[in-house]
Image: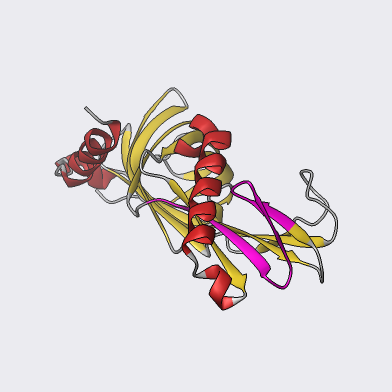
Amino acid sequence: MQRRPVLAALALSLLAAPAPAHAMQFGISVGARAGTLGIGADVAVPVGRQVAIRGGAGLLGFDMDMTGRFGLADHRTAELSLPQALYTIGAEVSFLGLRAGAGILFKSGDPSYRIDLDQGASIDIGGNTYTEPAVSTLTTTYAWSSGAPYLTVGLGSLTGAGFGFLIDVGAVLLEDSSFSMSATGDGTLISSSQFLDDLRTEERDVRDDAGGWADFWPIVSIGFRLGLPGGV
């Protein structure tokens, strides 16, 4: 049995559970966070002394110049682009300042890594060498379906009035993740069956190099919360 459907069903069942009558005794919490889920805000709604529904949104989108890093060959530039935003909704259980949570993550787009070749530069794709301008750019996209489940553990309670600090670590589970490649350059070459076969070979090589790490998106987040007074 795959983990993804089971965890997603668990998270949805927790979200759908009716709040007990005494939940209104605890106010909601609003907060801010920063980390691998972006910089943003979240809201926690208690459904008891130790259980809360928590949702958040983080702005992550930015482009990072990777030229000269991670062994990138000369005469080319590289850029890493991340999704504009990541959204989470889940349920968390607190006990003595420790938390455990599960939920679902949604994203606005897929991360991508683009290499631009300088004039006359060459690149190996699928075991064959191509030279600019026959191939001018190569883009690798790391994709997974929206609605991926996640698991977290953390420090700091989501319930109670006043300020508090929160630390979260965990992972998004991406069992359906994949790498796809595209290129620009000479139209006839780019659309040829030989070149497309080389792209597929390169995709498999990238996936093999990534190994099991491609099945996870790490969660590391630091933030604070303000618990608002609840009702009667």
> Is 200 above or below relative to 120?
above
| Quadrant position of residue 172 | top left
Residue 169: x and y, percent? 52, 33
Quadrant of the snapshot with the N terminus: top left
Q: Position of residue 121 (x, y in %)?
A: 80, 63
Q: Horizontal placement of 184 versus 67: left or right? A: left
- Residue visible at 75% across and 55% down? 66
Q: Is residue 161 left or right of residue 52?
A: right
Tell me which residue sits at (50%, 42%) in the image.
204
| 12 drawn magenta | no
Relative side of 67 to 191, left or right: right
Q: Residue at x 33, y 42 (%)?
A: 103
Exactly how many numbered labels are in the figure?
Answer: 0
Q: Nearer the viewer, residue 213 or 191?
A: 191
Residue bounds of the magenta highlight: 123-144
Q: Residue at x 72, y 56 (%)?
A: 123
Prevailing SS of the magenta stretch: strand
**Where is residue 45 drawn, in percent x and y?**
32, 48
Q: Is residue 216 visible?
A: no
Q: Residue furthest top?
A: 96
Residue 136 forms part of the magenta stretch: yes
Residue 46 lies, in percent from the top left, at 31, 43
Above-or-below relation of 31 to 169: below
Q: Inspect this view and state whether residue 48 appears.
A: yes
What color scheme is it? secondary structure
Nearest the viewer among 179 and 18 is 179
Taking depth in this image into account, of 215 and 51 the one nearest to the observer is 215
